[in-house]
Amino acid sequence: MTTARWLSIALHPFVMVAVMVGVAAAKRQTRGEAAGSVGIVILFTIAPLAILMWRQVRRGKWENADASNRTDRPVLYAVGAIALVALLAYLFLIRPESFMVRGVVAILGMMAVCAAATKWIKVSLHMAFATLAATALALSRSPIGYGLLLALPALVWSRLTLQRHTVPEVALGTCIGAVAAAALHYL
């Protein structure tokens, strides 16, 4: 497997969400509670999206798990929105004081903007999520956030080398992720 592909996997949106939640939870909770927060996110959001991706590729509807065609994106956004709303409902009912409430709202907003833009452009979700995680964690003074910021150019290179996106698509993903992180941190 090429370096570009490995970078794309290592900085995948699923990984970025788990890292962001894990680091934020570790600051606020015990290690076991932090693992529980990551587990809840995996159960409510990552697992349903992973199943969707696996099924769509297996059935031949998508050429790869990245939903690389703009026409693949509406179902991805719909399942993602349902999963995020379910997670938000769980948090409101079971853990309304959780730090994750603001994060889920920020990601819902980010995904809504990306979904709306899909009519014209296929926003790089890899860049949106990596930039969100890197910026949000760096704004909270996490060394992991600073490390992720340094990795963003490599991810841009990866997405362009794999020909999954164009320069405007990765640039827009980066901008949307940065705005979502700023909203999460400052609002």
Image: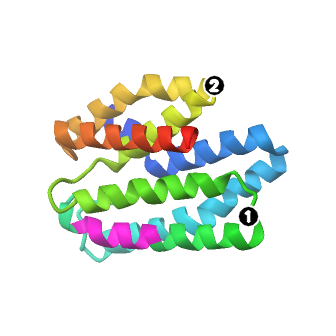
The percent position of residue 106, horizontal first and vertical second, equals 50, 52
Q: Main secondary structure of the magenta part?
A: helix
- The single residue placed furthest to the bottom in the displayed view is 59
In this picture, is 167 found above or below 113?
above
Magenta stretch: includes residue 142: no
**Residue located beneath label 2 in the image:** 141
Residue 2 seen in this snapshot: no
Amino acid type of the residue that numbered disc 1 sits on in the rendered structure: Pro
Image quarter where the N terminus lies is: top left
Nearer the observer, 51 or 75: 75
At mark 1, the secondary structure is: loop
The segment highlighted magenta reads 72-81
**Residue located beneath label 1 in the image:** 96
Left or right: residue 124 versus residue 37 is left
* Few, some or many residues within 10 Å of mark 2 (<14, 14–19, 20+): few
- The mark lying in front, picked from 2 and 1, is 1
The percent position of residue 87, horizontal first and vertical second, equals 60, 68
